[in-house]
Image (cartoon, rainbow, N blue to C red):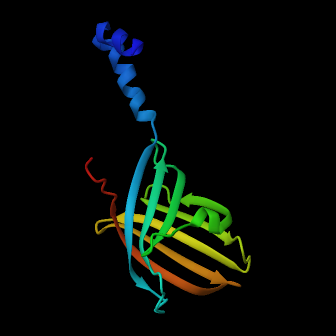
């Protein structure tokens, strides 16, 4: 509160640097995604019905965090951070493309690569799982900004 009071009495020249500081705050995208194509056509008793993706970027669009959580029809949640370890996060400079890859915690023979990107068609998220270097699973999902219910 003290800072706000001081700003209210400051000149316009002094306010400009303070307003510019907002540009140094990280940006966050919270998305909900639904699977539109997959290589797995089994009849799961508790299928995944949505995927939540949270992306945090620096002001220069460098990713600092990409959190992926699958939600099943029963409400169970599966965090890729818990399922896959030794992961890393990369991006394509100048493009809205972000990637993670990691090794399955329970079975190191499996690795996964996730990709999040935006183009003229909107946001998309995909995953590819590999076993011993051969692709064993893939899926593509279409995303939209997460909508919060009104209080």
| Outermost residue to the bottom | 42
Q: Quadrant of the N terminus?
A: top left
Quadrant of the image occupied by residue 122: bottom left
Residue 77 lies, in percent from the top left, at 51, 67
Q: Is residue 60 above or below residue 85?
A: above
Image height of 15 relative to 63, above or below:
above
Between residue 122 and residue 75, name the one nearer to us: 75
Q: Given the current orientation, which residue lies at the most extreme front position? A: 74
Query: For residue 128, which quarter of the picture?
Result: bottom right
Please name the residue shown 39% across and 21% down the image: 18
Residue 61 image offset from top left, x and y in percent: 46, 48
- State the image coordinates of residue 72 (x, y, percent, origin top left): 46, 74
Q: Nearer the viewer, residue 44 or 114?
A: 44
* Front in this rendered view, residue 9 or 78: 78
Question: Residue lying furthest left in this view?
Answer: 150
Residue drawn at point x = 68 percent, y = 65 percent: 85
In this picture, residue 11 sits left or right of residue 141: left
Residue 19 on image: x %, y %: 35, 25
Q: Is residue 104 above or below residue 85?
A: below
At x 42%, y 27%, the residue is 21
Residue lying at the far right of the rendered structure = 108
Count all numbered tags in the image, as a single digit: 0
What residue lies at 63% left-to-right and 64% top-to-bottom? 82
């Amino acid at each position: 509160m003290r800072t706000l009071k001081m700003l209210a009495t400051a000149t316009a020249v002094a306010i400009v640097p303070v307003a510019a500081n907002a540009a140094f705050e990280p940006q966050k995208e919270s998305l909900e995604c639904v699977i539109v194509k997959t290589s797995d056509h089994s009849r799961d008793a508790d299928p995944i019905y949505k995927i939540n993706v949270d992306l945090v970027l620096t002001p220069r669009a460098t990713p600092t965090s990409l959190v992926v959580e699958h939600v099943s029809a029963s409400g169970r949640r599966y965090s890729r951070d818990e399922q896959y370890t030794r992961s890393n996060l990369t991006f394509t400079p100048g493009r809205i493309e972000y990637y993670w890859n990691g090794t399955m915690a329970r079975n190191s023979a499996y690795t996964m690569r996730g990709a999040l990107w935006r183009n003229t068609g909107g946001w998309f998220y995909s995953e590819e799982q590999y076993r011993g270097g051969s692709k064993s699973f893939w899926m593509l999902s279409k995303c939209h900004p997460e909508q919060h219910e009104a209080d």
